[in-house]
Image: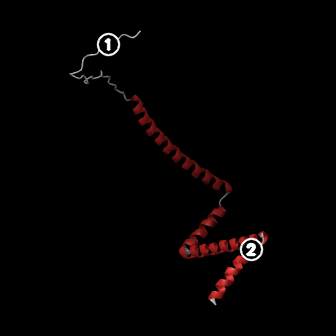
Amino acid sequence: MSVSLYHNAKKFIRDIQRSDEVRRKKWFIGGSIVSVLFILLLWVVYVSIDFPRIEPPVSEIQKNAQTEEKKTNESVFNVFGRGIKNISDDFKTQYNTFKESIGKNFSSFKGDVQEKNTMYIQGARLNFVFDKLDPIPPTRLP
């Protein structure tokens, strides 16, 4: 049976290859959709196995419900005020961190700029005179 299934599948693929362009595009799009759905199914199964749902204990659910009730009793201005306070506190900490890093970088740059460089200029040491050569007289250029 497997041999006939193999030959039937091979014949089916050859028929698709020899068919017109429209039929080949339809089979290509259908095969692509089936492949994508199969991969998505495998991904969903993997995620559900790898990351099981964890239900919080009953006491946490009750605490969440109580905080939700408190939040519903607050006015809009209290909520906005708390949000603005959180944003301003975050901005202050980021500004202080930025200021400290700029201060450190500026002080190191200032130290590099104020550092004095020393330069030594020495005359050339001409120690390549050979003993057995005749001295060459200097010639004046015009």
Q: Crowdedness of circle 1 by 10 Å Cα count: few (<14), some, many (20+)? A: few
Q: What is the image's colouring?
A: secondary structure
Q: Residue at x 75, y 69 (%)?
A: 25
Horizontal side of residue 70 vs 130, given as left or right = right
Report, in whole angstroms, how far the alpha carbon at label 2 lies from the one at label 1.
94 Å
Comparing 127 with 82, the one in front is: 127
Residue 114 against residue 94 in the figure, above or below: above
Amino acid type at mark 2:
Arg
Task: Indicate the position of residue 43 as horizontal and vertical percent values.
Answer: 60, 72
| In contact (CB < 8 Å): disc 2 and disc 1 | no
Identify the image quadrant of residue 79: bottom right
Task: Indicate the position of residue 16 as horizontal and vertical percent values.
Answer: 73, 75
Reading the image, the residue beneath label 1 is 138
Image quarter of the C terminus: top left
Name the residue at the left extreme.
Answer: 131
Amino acid type at mark 1:
Pro
Residue 1 against residue 37 in the figure, above or below: below
Task: Indicate the position of residue 14 as horizontal and vertical percent values.
Answer: 70, 77
**Element at label 1:** loop
Q: Residue at x 29, y 13 (%)?
A: 137
Q: Residue at x 37, y 29 (%)?
A: 115
Horizontal side of residue 22 vs 3, given as left or right = right
Task: Indicate the position of residue 44 as horizontal and vertical percent values.
Answer: 61, 74
